[in-house]
Image (cartoon, rainbow, N blue to C red):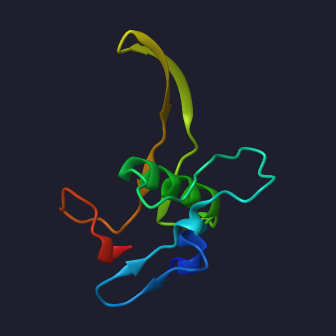
């Protein structure tokens, strides 16, 4: 049986869940001071969805299960430069790997990891 990391490892110490809700505190998405590869996320009343989603992915990347039997892995970001919208932009690419027993399903089943 795969290891089962604590819910708070991924979502922060302030996370709560019920049968119908997950409540993640935005303050838990802030990177701890002194990280060698850090990022900035400022909680606000009107954070954009992409800001919040990226902060959640970065937190997951930082705190993910490192055991050999982990079923959900977010790979580190690779960078490149692309010319888009008449300017140079840095492109960051990461891959999510999900491991589960073989099924015929087209999409991974959350209930099976």
Task: Kindly give the residue lying farthest to the top in the view shown.
Answer: 86
Residue 61 lies, in percent from the top left, at 58, 55
Report the residue at 51% width, 80% height from top.
15
Residue 101 lies, in percent from the top left, at 34, 69
Q: Is residue 54 depicted above or below 18 in this figure?
A: above
Residue 90 lies, in percent from the top left, at 52, 24
Between 3 and 15, the one lying in front of the other is 15
Task: Kindly give the residue lying farthest to the bottom in the view shown.
Answer: 19
Report the residue at 45% width, 49% height from top.
51
Task: Kindly give the residue lying farthest to the right in the view shown.
Answer: 34
Q: Is residue 14 depicted above or below 95 in this figure?
A: below
Quadrant (top left/top right/bottom left/bottom right) for the C terminus? bottom left
Judge from the rendering whether residue 48 lies leftward or rightward of residue 12; answer left or right.
Answer: left
Report the residue at 55% width, 60% height from top.
60
Decide if residue 60 is in sight here: yes
Judge from the rendering whether residue 85 lies leftward or rightward of residue 82; answer left or right.
Answer: left
Decide if residue 5 is in sight here: no
Residue 5 lies, in percent from the top left, at 57, 77
Q: Is residue 102 depicted above or below 34 in this figure?
A: below
């Amino acid at each position: 049986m795969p290891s089962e990391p604590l819910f708070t490892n991924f979502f922060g110490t302030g996370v709560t869940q019920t049968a119908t809700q997950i409540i993640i505190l935005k303050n838990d998405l802030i990177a701890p001071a002194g990280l060698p590869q850090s990022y900035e996320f400022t909680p606000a009343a009107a954070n954009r969805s992409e800001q919040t989603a990226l902060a959640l992915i970065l937190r997951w990347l930082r705190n993910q299960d490192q055991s050999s039997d982990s079923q959900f892995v977010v790979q580190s970001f690779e960078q490149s430069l692309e010319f888009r919208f008449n300017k140079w932009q840095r492109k960051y690419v990461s891959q999510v790997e999900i491991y589960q027993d073989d099924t015929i399903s087209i999409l991974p089943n959350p209930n099976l990891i």
